[in-house]
Amino acid sequence: MIEGAVSGSELTITAAGDLDLAERAQFPPLVALAEADGVDRVVVDLCGVGFVDSSGASFLVQLAARVRRAGGRAVLRGADDGVLYVLRVCGTLAAFDVDATHRCPPTSGRGPWRVDRG
């Protein structure tokens, strides 16, 4: 599952489960939301994501590139160590500002890494 919501000048994209080829039909409408007039910040919340494949990483690169080209910011929050590793290897992580202060709810995600370390 992946969805986006615009509030003021911020688009928040929330994903849960796997960010992979199966979700590819959702990617173009979300990129279009990022290109909407007035959106200057895109926050991608990956608290509920346990896996990202190359198509998910490509979507994130495309999303960040579009918002940055328009002079905005792309922020990534809530990615666990495994997802961060994949994004780093794919070269995707460098396209985002990483919100290291964000804490995911303790019940989100799929695994023991989802513990509130608050």
Image: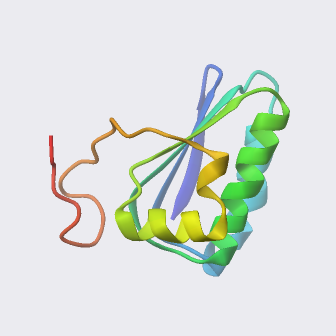
Q: Pinpoint residue 44: horizontal percent, then vertical percent.
A: 54, 46
Q: Pinpoint residue 40: horizontal percent, then vertical percent.
A: 71, 25
Q: How is the image coloured?
A: rainbow
Instruction: Judge from the rendering whether residue 83 lies leftward or rightward of residue 64; answer left or right.
Output: left
Q: Nearer the viewer, residue 68 or 42?
A: 68
Can I make out residue 35 in this image?
A: no
- Residue drawn 23% across the image and 72% down it: 111
Can I make out residue 87 in this image?
A: yes
Instruction: Judge from the rendering whether residue 12 lies leftward or rightward of residue 67; answer left or right.
Output: left
Dividing the image into 4 quarters, which one contains the C terminus? Answer: top left
Q: Pinpoint residue 70: horizontal percent, then vertical percent.
A: 84, 30
* Quarter of image, res 81: bottom left
Instruction: Judge from the rendering whether residue 79 lies leftward or rightward of residue 19; answer left or right.
Output: left
- Residue drawn 65% across the image and 59% down it: 92
Q: So how many labels did they put on this image?
A: 0
Q: Pinpoint residue 106: horizontal percent, then vertical percent.
A: 18, 53
* Quarter of image, res 100: top left
- Residue drawn 16% across the image and 57% down it: 115
- Give the vertical position of 107 relative to 32 (above or below): below
Instruction: Judge from the rendering whether residue 74 lies leftward or rightward of residue 115; answer left or right.
Output: right
- Residue drawn 69% across the image and 74% down it: 55
Q: Nearer the viewer, residue 13 or 70?
A: 70
- Give the vertical position of 61 relative to 53 (above or below): above
